[in-house]
Structure formats: structure tokens, C-alpha cells
Image (cartoon, rainbow, N blue to C red):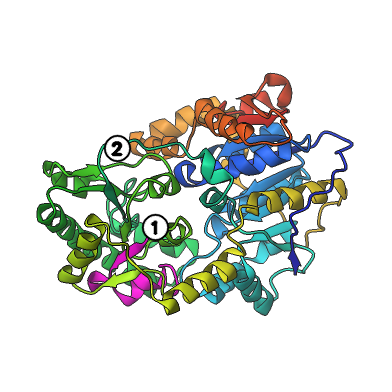
């Protein structure tokens, strides 16, 4: 095991390296990924921030020295094989590095992937994830690095000072929902999402039960939220659905003047301005604790299957019926701060230490150090002991190029699929604003820039999507 220290070697990079960083969910992940790129750029490493659905085109077009991938799963193995064929090093930084209550199940899931030896570096969120990987003997210790998760850096100083303000006239309680399976934004119903869970490697019985429970809990929650708004008409409630969750079931609640739906900005930015958080099995409860905002869980509609994917430990104040929930809300309205019990405080501290390594604001720095030192070591590619798979779709991408392939896909799949892909994109302006916020707090006064990718950056211009952003000094 290697636990990364904070101090970075001041040796300058002798040659210009290029790194691609994949963004899975822009609302959740763009700030953390940009923060890694900001650190790397200051070490004279050119970074390209790539939307997830553009990576099959843009990574091949850019041919970087290393790609930071958002996960290792069966559905992206063919892409990783293609990257290796170009001698591109692969670093994994999980989008979900602390999923559910049982990390050993996640390790077992990774263990089933035969192509694990594609990975050059695996950045882990915390010591508990490391232990689960170690028990399964997934990787050698020279590959795994405990770094923490960069997006949580914005919970603490100095990065919390860069958070944009959400200006509201009235105080409000934030409600975060997490029903992308039971209330999907991009597919017809939860049964399609159930199949998607199985395709990702979930047990069929668990996927069926989880999808059904998620659908039922979502419908129950809508009724609870309606009752909340009517019970407290003079206090505001802001609902922030999961980015991949439909807002349609909640729209009937907009008849309440004290209710608002918002799917923009990060959870951390909303938590920075709210009074408290109401949720059900939402990982945002961890961020809430880190932001010193008390989370309240609507436990009476919970189920064992839903709990299995929720945050572990005794994080939240549990409301076991509507009366208890009302009491919590009343206390918040009357400025009576919810006080966690000593046992709860201890469990929260243990959870953050074991799952997220440290709430110290240095996770992005540790990831950048891992990448920088790996590139400087001039390590050669791993020798693969399996045959490259023929990927018909990737061949079509590279023969046709982005524009033609994209046009054909849009004709075949329709506007619904196009909508889902567009939701994973981000703009140059969004990245520029993050970079400007970060440059303001840099004591070394090194100006990092964000810009469009130029033609001379590209090895195969026709493959490029023009949606990737370049970060450099």
C-alpha cells in the first residue's frame, strides 16, 4: 500500500506530457477533475478534460501519455484495450469509490473483470477500499495508491472559499434525492434500469428488488414532500434530484410557493448555503457532514435493498415517521441546531477516515502527484496476457470519424439517446470559471488557462468531437 504524502517533488517535467481526464457526471465530477488538471498543469503537464461519451473519439484523437478513467467495469474494457494498443497508460479514479455499505462486494465485482492487468495505477478513496482490494489480491501494491476523492476537496479550506454563492432571499432546507433507477431521466422505466444494473454486474435478484423498491420509495417520497410543503408554508424547500433522475414526478409540487426544483450546480455548492439536508440513502449525506450541515434521513420508507446502496454508518438523524421529521424541521426553522450524539460523531469521523482517507483538501494534489511521478518514471506499458478483442463499434468510429458516426447514431437511436449524451457534456465557460476561482487562491501565482483544443494538438483530427477542453500554463 502507498499512502500519498502531501509534499510534491519540485523537479520540473523534462518533456511535455499529455493527460486526458474523463468526466462522468459534470455536475458532480467536473470541479474535482478540473482541480486535478489545475495541479498537473502547474507541473507543465498538458491536460484535456474529456466528456465521458466523447472519450472513444477524443482520447484516440489526442493520443495522450496517460488517461484518467472514471471506472473499471465490463462496459469500458474494450475502450481500455484500445487505449493500450496506442501505448496510453491507464489510471483509474473511481467516480463511486465508496459505494454502499459493503466494499468487499465491490472488490468482488472488480475481481470478475479478467482485464484488470490493463490498469497501470488505481487511485483508491480510502483505507477500507484498499483493504477490500488487498483481500481479493486485485492489484500489486505498486499499482494501488490511496489518494481520497478530489471532489470532496471543495468541502474544506482553501477550496471551500472558491465556491460560488447561491443567492436566495430566504433560508431553505435542501432535499437531495437519488432515484436514477426508480425514476430514470433517460429511459422509459425502472425495468430498463434493472437490466442496466445486471449488465453492469449486479446480481439479477438484487437488481430486480432494488429497482422495484426504488420506484415505490420515489412515489412515497413525492407524497411526503407535498405534506412537508403544506405543513411548513412559510419556510422554503429546494429539491435537487440526482442528475440522472427525472424531475417530472416532482413538478406537481411546484404549486407550493415554498418549493423549488433545481438540477444545476454541485451538491457541495447547495450544501454551502442551506440549513440542513433531507435525504434517503444519498451519498450526499457524507458531504453534508463534511460541510457541517446536519443530514436527516426519511427512514420509514427505506428498505434493506435500498440501504445496501446507501452510505454506511450512523451518519444521519433518522426520522422514523412524519412526526419525527416535522420535529427536526421545526428545530431548524427555530434556529435550534440539531446536535449529533457522541456515538454518531465518532462514527462519522471513522467513516470519513476509513472511506475518504482524510477530509484535508489534498486529495486532488495526491492524485496529481501519483500521475506526475508515474510519468516521470518513464514506466513502460504492462505486458498483456490476453488477446485484443475486435470492437466493431470502435472500428466504425475510427473509419467514419466523429461527425459522420454521430450523425448515423442520431438517426438510428433518436433524440432521447442524444439528450442523454448531451447531459454529460460541459462548456469551455464552465471550466474557465472553475480555473479562475482556483487561480485566485494560488499562492505561487501560476496562471493556469482553459481553452479549446487546437488542430495541432490532434493526431487524428476527424476523430475529435470539439467538446474536450484543454488545461495548460
Residue picked out by circle 2: 168
Query: At 60% across and 73% down in the image, what residue appears?
Result: 128
- Whether residue 191 sits left or right of residue 421 in the image: it is left
Q: Considering only vertical position in the picture, is 252 above or below 291? A: above
**Is residue 313 or residue 405 the one in the foreground?**
313
Res 293 label: 1
Query: At 27% across and 48% down in the image, what residue appears?
Result: 172
Q: Quadrant of residue 115?
A: bottom right
- Residue 334: x %, y % from top left: 22, 57
Q: Considering only vertical position in the picture, is 172 above or below 469? A: below
Looking at marks 1 and 2 on the same chain, the residue that comes earlier in the sequence is marked by 2
- Residue 200: x %, y % from top left: 48, 61
- Whether residue 182 sits left or right of residue 383 in the image: it is left
Residue 371 highlighted magenta (yes or no) = no
Q: Is mark 1 on a helix, strand or loop?
A: loop
**Is residue 414 or residue 354 the one in the foreground?**
354
**Is residue 366 or residue 344 the one in the foreground?**
344
Using the numbered discs, state the Cα–Cα distance from disc 1 to disc 2 in whole angstroms. Answer: 17 Å
- What span is in magenta? 294-313
Q: Considering only vertical position in the picture, is 81 above or below 460? A: below
Q: Can residue 376 be seen in this view?
A: yes
Quadrant where the N terminus lies? bottom right
Label pair 1/2, CB-CB below 8 angstroms: no
Residue 301 highlighted magenta (yes or no) = yes
Q: Is residue 20 visible?
A: no
Crowding at label 1, few (<14), some or many (≥20) Cα neighbours within 10 Å? Answer: many
Amino acid at each position: 500500500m502507498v499512502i500519498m504524502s502531501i509534499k510534491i517533488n519540485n523537479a520540473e517535467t523534462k518533456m511535455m506530457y499529455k493527460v486526458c481526464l474523463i468526466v462522468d457526471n459534470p455536475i458532480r465530477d467536473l470541479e474535482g477533475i478540473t482541480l486535478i488538471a489545475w495541479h498537473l498543469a502547474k507541473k507543465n503537464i498538458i491536460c484535456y478534460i474529456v466528456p465521458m461519451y466523447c472519450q472513444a473519439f477524443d482520447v484516440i484523437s489526442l493520443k495522450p501519455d496517460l488517461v484518467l478513467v472514471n471506472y473499471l467495469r465490463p462496459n469500458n474494457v474494450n475502450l481500455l484495450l484500445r487505449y493500450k494498443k496506442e501505448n496510453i497508460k491507464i489510471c483509474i479514479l473511481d467516480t463511486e469509490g465508496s459505494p454502499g455499505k459493503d466494499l468487499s462486494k465491490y472488490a468482488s465485482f472488480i475481481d470478475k473483470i479478467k482485464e484488470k492487468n490493463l490498469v497501470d495505477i488505481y487511485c483508491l478513496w480510502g483505507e477500507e477500499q484498499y483493504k477490500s482490494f488487498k483481500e481479493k489480491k486485485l492489484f500489486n501494491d505498486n499499482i494501488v495508491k490511496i489518494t481520497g476523492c478530489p471532489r470532496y476537496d471543495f468541502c474544506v479550506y482553501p477550496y471551500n472559499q472558491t465556491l460560488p454563492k447561491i443567492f436566495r432571499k430566504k433560508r431553505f432546507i435542501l432535499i437531495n434525492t437519488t432515484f436514477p433507477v426508480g425514476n430514470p431521466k433517460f429511459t422509459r422505466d425502472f425495468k430498463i434500469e434493472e437490466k442496466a444494473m445486471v449488465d453492469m454486474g449486479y446480481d439479477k435478484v438484487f437488481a430486480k428488488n432494488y429497482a422495484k423498491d426504488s420506484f415505490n420509495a420515489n412515489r412515497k417520497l413525492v407524497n411526503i414532500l407535498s405534506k412537508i410543503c403544506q405543513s411548513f408554508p412559510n419556510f422554503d424547500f429546494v429539491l435537487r434530484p440526482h442528475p440522472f433522475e427525472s424531475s417530472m414526478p416532482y413538478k406537481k409540487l411546484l404549486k407550493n410557493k415554498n418549493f423549488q426544483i433545481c438540477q444545476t450546480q454541485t451538491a457541495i455548492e447547495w450544501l454551502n448555503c442551506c440549513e440542513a439536508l433531507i435525504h434517503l440513502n444519498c451519498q450526499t449525506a457524507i458531504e453534508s457532514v463534511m460541510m457541517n450541515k446536519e443530514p436527516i434521513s426519511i427512514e420509514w420508507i427505506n428498505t434493506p435493498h435500498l440501504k445496501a446502496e446507501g452510505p454506511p454508518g450512523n451518519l444521519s438523524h433518522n426520522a422514523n415517521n412524519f412526526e419525527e421529521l416535522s420535529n427536526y424541521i421545526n428545530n431548524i426553522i427555530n434556529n435550534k441546531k440539531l446536535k449529533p450524539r457522541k456515538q454518531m460523531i465518532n462514527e462519522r469521523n471513522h467513516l470519513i477516515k476509513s472511506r475518504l482517507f482524510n477530509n484535508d483538501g489534498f486529495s486532488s494534489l495526491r492524485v496529481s502527484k501519483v500521475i506526475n511521478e508515474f510519468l516521470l518514471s518513464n514506466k513502460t506499458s504492462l505486458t498483456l496476457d490476453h488477446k485484443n478483442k475486435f470492437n466493431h463499434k470502435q472500428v466504425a468510429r475510427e473509419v467514419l470519424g466523429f461527425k459522420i458516426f454521430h450523425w448515423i447514431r442520431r438517426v438510428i437511436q433518436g433524440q432521447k439517446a442524444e439528450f442523454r449524451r448531451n447531459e454529460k457534456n460541459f462548456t469551455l465557460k464552465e471550466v474557465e470559471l472553475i480555473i479562475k476561482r482556483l487561480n485566485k487562491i494560488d499562492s505561487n501565482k501560476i496562471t493556469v488557462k482553459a481553452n479549446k483544443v487546437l488542430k495541432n494538438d490532434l493526431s487524428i483530427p476527424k476523430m475529435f468531437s470539439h467538446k474536450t477542453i484543454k488545461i495548460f500554463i
